[in-house]
Amino acid sequence: MPAVNEILNCLFAVAPERYKMDGDNVGLMCGHSDRAVTKVLVALDATQEVAEEAKTRGCELVVTHHPLIYGGTNTVSDATITGRRLLAYLENGLAVISMHTNLDCAPGGVNDVLAERLGLKDIRVMPNIDDAPYLIRYGEVREQSLAEFVPFVKQRLACEGVRYCDGGQPVRRVAVGGGSCGDLLTPVREVLGCDTFVTADVKYHQFADAREMGLNLIDAGHFETENPVCACLVTKLRAAFPEIEVIPSALHADCTKFA
């Protein structure tokens, strides 16, 4: 059976560490690198719920997109959320590997999967701009109204709801940025010439800015824009390690609700 570090090397071949953004934390978050693995659970987040699911389903390794440790931690105790999460994995003998912004930027990663899910054609990568190299994807769709495109996005990403503003343009050239990419409105509009941008975590003033610059802006949710990559990771790991079982989380979902 492969060891944790063999699976880590495979994932870094899919999403090389050099693609990560400054200050990000990717790789082995906790656990023994030489432990043999028979079963892997894949989820977007390394929550306590996911730790319990991994334990119940007999996994030795959890692979996530969002890092278990982000921004540093001074203690591993039950006094903090990060500490409680770490204890949930460590006390159950679980290793955690996280592929974050390197997976956002890598070919075939978060944003390529998102672009394909939304039916973009002739998918391209935004040129290297400031601190977001290789992040945004953009491409063409059949010309349609925003009123037609919004419910399509909602359906394709299984969103409970979306927020959006109308930039006054028909939808033809679409950019996507899984997670929080609202600070890239200007290059999406002015450099890429996109009329529509699908991302998440958009702030109030960013909606206002987008409308004034003539950009349709759709906030489809952080979880919803990134979670499709989990199925891709499952497929890649199953192909690379046919001798082990690789399963997607059956419990992890977006905790954000709409009233």
Image: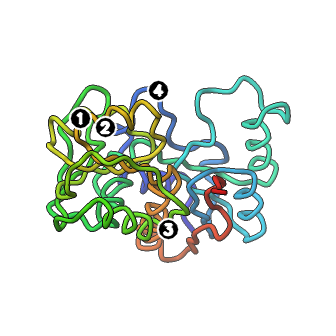
Q: Residue 74: x, y in percent?
A: 72, 23
Pointer 2 and pointer 3: residues touching (CB < 8 Å)? no
Left or right of residue 164, residue 175 in this image: left
Q: Which residue is mark 4?
A: 23
Q: Which residue is mark 1?
A: 213
Look at discs 4 and 2 and give the one toward the viewer: 2
Q: Is residue 145 above or below residue 212?
A: below
Mark 3 crowdedness (10 Å alpha carbons): few <14, some 14-19, many ≥20: few
x 34%, y 37%: residue = 18
Amino acid beneath label 1 = Met
Amino acid beneath label 3 = Ala
What whole-number distance in Å separates the C-alpha atoms at marks 4 and 2?
28 Å
x 73%, y 56%: residue = 51
x 76%, y 37%: residue = 81
Indicate the quadrant where residue 121 lies: bottom left
Mark 2 crowdedness (10 Å alpha carbons): few <14, some 14-19, many ≥20: many
Left or right of residue 74, residue 157 in this image: left
Look at discs 1 and 3 and give the one toward the viewer: 1
Pointer 2 and pointer 1: residues touching (CB < 8 Å)? yes
Q: Tell which circle, 2 or 3, labels the residue nearer the N-terminal end.
A: 3
Pointer 4 and pointer 2: residues touching (CB < 8 Å)? no
Q: Which residue is mark 3?
A: 158
Amino acid beneath label 4 = Gly
Question: Dot 1 lies on which element?
Answer: loop
Question: Dot 3 lies on which element?
Answer: loop
Instruction: Please state which of residues 179 and 159 is positioned toward the viewer in this rendering.
Output: 159
Look at discs 2 and 3 and give the one toward the viewer: 2
Q: Tell which circle, 4 or 2, labels the residue nearer the N-terminal end.
A: 4
Marking on residue 210: 2
What whole-number distance in Å separates the C-alpha atoms at marks 1 and 3?
28 Å
Mark 1 crowdedness (10 Å alpha carbons): few <14, some 14-19, many ≥20: some
Instruction: Please state which of residues 230 and 204 is positioned toward the viewer in this rendering.
Output: 204
